[in-house]
Image: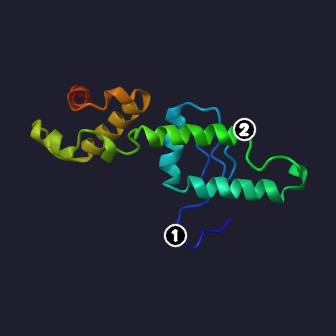
Amino acid sequence: MTKPNNGSRLPIKCPKCGNTHLKTEHIQGSKKKTIKRWLRKVKGLQNDLFTLRMADRAGNKAKAGKPLVTTYMKDLQNKIREIEEYQEPMDVTDLKISGSDLIEMGYTPGPQFGVTLRALLEKVDDDASLNEIEKLKEMAVELLKE
């Protein structure tokens, strides 16, 4: 598959198997954390990927007469809508802490800031209630000690 003209980064490597394909089977039925990681990788192209998946099913003679949108795809789309509806953090910029806060806490800027913010995002992926400035500061102190 070649790179689309719109400059996107398709094809996307599957986060579970590492193969390049349009199928969404590996993330269907997954936890929110896995879906959010996939959404970060596809960077806003999820609707295009669903459209491509439906086109793939439409052109597949073995799938003739079967629905273009499977139950798994509907489930995945519902989970994505839920993530978007609740505006769950998708990127370090969505965290309620930033490098500026770490500087105010007395830390010197450097590569450890990015590592720390990404680690905090992983924790918030597990539990969105952790995305509070005081909780994040406490966790940042622990991470920056290491």
Give residue 91's position: percent from left, percent from top: 38, 45
* Residue contact at pointers 1 and 2, CB within 8 angstroms: no
Of labels 1 and 2, earlier in sequence is 1
Q: Which residue is pictured at 85% across the width and 56% down the height?
A: 60
Residue 26 visible, this angle: no
Secondary element under disc 1, as helix, strand or loop, is: loop
Kind of residue indicated by mark 1: Gly
Circle 2 SS class: helix
Residue at the disc numbered 2? 71
Q: Nearer the viewer, residue 46 or 112?
A: 46
Q: In this view, does 56 lie above or below 18?
A: below
Q: Which residue lies under the disc numbered 1? A: 7
51 relative to 93, above or below: below
In the picture, measured across the screen, residue 117 lies left or right of residue 26, that is left
Specify the amino acid type for callout 2.
Answer: Thr
Q: Which colour scheme is used?
A: rainbow
Query: Horizontally, is 128 left or right of 69 in the view?
Result: left
